[in-house]
Image (cartoon, rainbow, N blue to C red):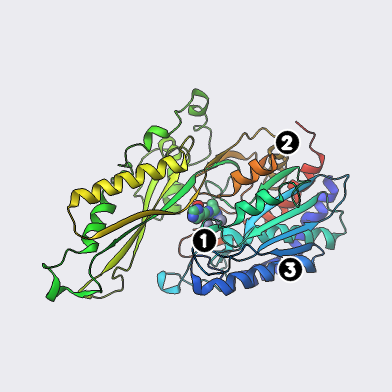
Amino acid sequence: MAPKLDRYFQQVDDLSDHFIERLRKAVAIPSISSEAPRRPDVIRMGHWLADELTNLGAQAELRALGKQHGTDLDLPPVVLARYGNDKSKRTILVYGHYDVQPAEKEDGWETEPFELTVKDDGRMLGRGSTDDKGPVLGWLNAIEAHKKAGIEFPVNLLMCFEGMEEYGSDGLDDLINAEAKKYFADADAVCISDNYWLGTEKPCLTYGLRGCNYYSVEVSGPGADLHSGVFGGTAQEPMTDLVRILGSLVDTDGKIQIPGIAEQVAPVTAEEDGLYDAISFTMETLHESLGSKTTIFEDKKPTLMARWRYPSLSIHGVEGAFSAPGAKTVIPAKVIGKFSIRTVPDMEIEKTNECVYKYVEEVFKKLGSKNTMKVYAQHCGNWWKSSPKHWNFVAAAKATERVWGVQPDYTREGGSIPVTLTFEQATGKNVLLLPMGSSTDGAHSINEKLDKRNYIEGTKLLGAYLHYVAEEPQN
Ligand SMILES: C[C@H](N)C(=O)N[C@@H](Cc1c[nH]cn1)C(=O)O
Ligand SMILES: [Zn+2]
Ligand SMILES: [Zn+2]
């Protein structure tokens, strides 16, 4: 296998400019799943991806998912593709997403978010570069480099790329369940490249994710926005109620104030307690990724535990509130607060929702307000945790050593990929998370980037992983 891999690596290097151009084209499509006016762009992105796959010789198809829950909006299609159908080879199912988080230059970006900008230091800035367009294109790049180098592709590759991950993967669970014994029937294992290294130097393999329950709290009263000079002091203000509700959810040190949440969390076992010290992670790297030193904990272990194995509650924003610069003397008539809870083993989605609804209703009742309040979950996705001892992980560890020259860390991820558990349960196969980007990539943030090194070596890693998968004995 060694000479074959060397030739593959050389071909990836030779094609690196072409691969960056491919990423430039993908970043230029503003496929923001959470903004309804951008839906045509998300759909265009799905078509672009399917066309690229077809041009590479894959059998690609677009699967419609119907309407977005509770709306008349078409969901973006899922891109399903197959490359190779040789019964003597293993089949690997890979998943990724082609939608992105919102981004505006005015948010503070140093470059146009939808124009890939390659800096002299190797940073490639652009929305979706690391989350998740770069890793998705890594699979396409791996196919192309094999073809151009004349190396036989080591496995059959099944691909499932969706356009709604950043908005709760609406409709995808049903498709996965329906196709588990059809399109995905011959998958031997699953691989997802959609998370990040813990730092900037040490690669990792990931065996856990937190879930995410995302909530809205609506408070309304007046029939329209009001002049605060005329109505201030006479009307009960929705924003005042909302701020007090949001302020009651979590304290400054991240402690969730809602009864019934902490009680569901699995206790720390002795085995788990011993895992943290060996992980290559420093508070300095965390401060670098955070852009400040405002961490809740001073030390590595409680910080990692807070990210991986405890729930957190974040307040994201308020729809309907005055948020522009300057001073507008308005009383908003209706405001919608958005917050989410990252969930962990052994929390249950429904139980957590009940705790949230009960608590928010009690807090609102205590305010004695005449306004109207509604609290509901927008979308919920499960946490996932598996064992990294499977041959799928063993193959990825060997590929990591080959490409990066070090043994990977075994990590859990604080973020969520809602369909991971669905893939595991529907196919009954092992799922591996194999990240490409690093901790300073700024996914979901301004100046999101993927380092050229991570994109190119990451493409080598995905290809090498498929070679090791082809040879790894069953365990
Ligand atoms: C880890 C992955 N790249 C990601 O960013 N996932 C999102 C998914 C999401 C959106 N709403 C709920 N889950 C995330 O973790 O925020
Ligand atoms: Zn992602
Ligand atoms: Zn994301």
Residue of label 3: 52
Q: Is residue 83 above or below residue 406?
A: below
Give the SS element for disc 2: helix
Which mark is in front, 3 or 1? 1
Q: CA distance from mark 2 to mark 3?
A: 31 Å
Task: Residue type at mark 1: give it.
Answer: His
Task: Residue type at mark 3: give it.
Answer: Glu
Q: Quadrant of residue 41?
A: bottom right
Q: CA distance from mark 2 to mark 1?
A: 38 Å
Residue density around tag 1, few if under 14, some if 14–19, many if 20 or more, within 10 Å: few
User: Is residue 455 at all visible to an observer of this figure?
Assistant: no
Residue of label 1: 69
The foreground one among 379 and 162 is 379
Residue of label 2: 391
The foreground one among 205 and 352 is 352
Give the SS element for disc 1: loop
Residue drawn 25% across and 76% down?
A: 326
The foreground one among 284 and 101 is 101
In the current view of this chain or complex, which residue is farthest to the top? 270
Task: Residue type at mark 2: give it.
Answer: Trp
Which mark is in front, 2 or 1? 1
Residue drawn 37% across and 51% down?
A: 314
Image position, residue 14 (x, y; %): 76, 64
Q: Is mark 1 within 8 Å of ligand 1?
A: no
Q: Quadrant of residue 150?
A: bottom right
Q: Quadrant of residue 164?
A: bottom right
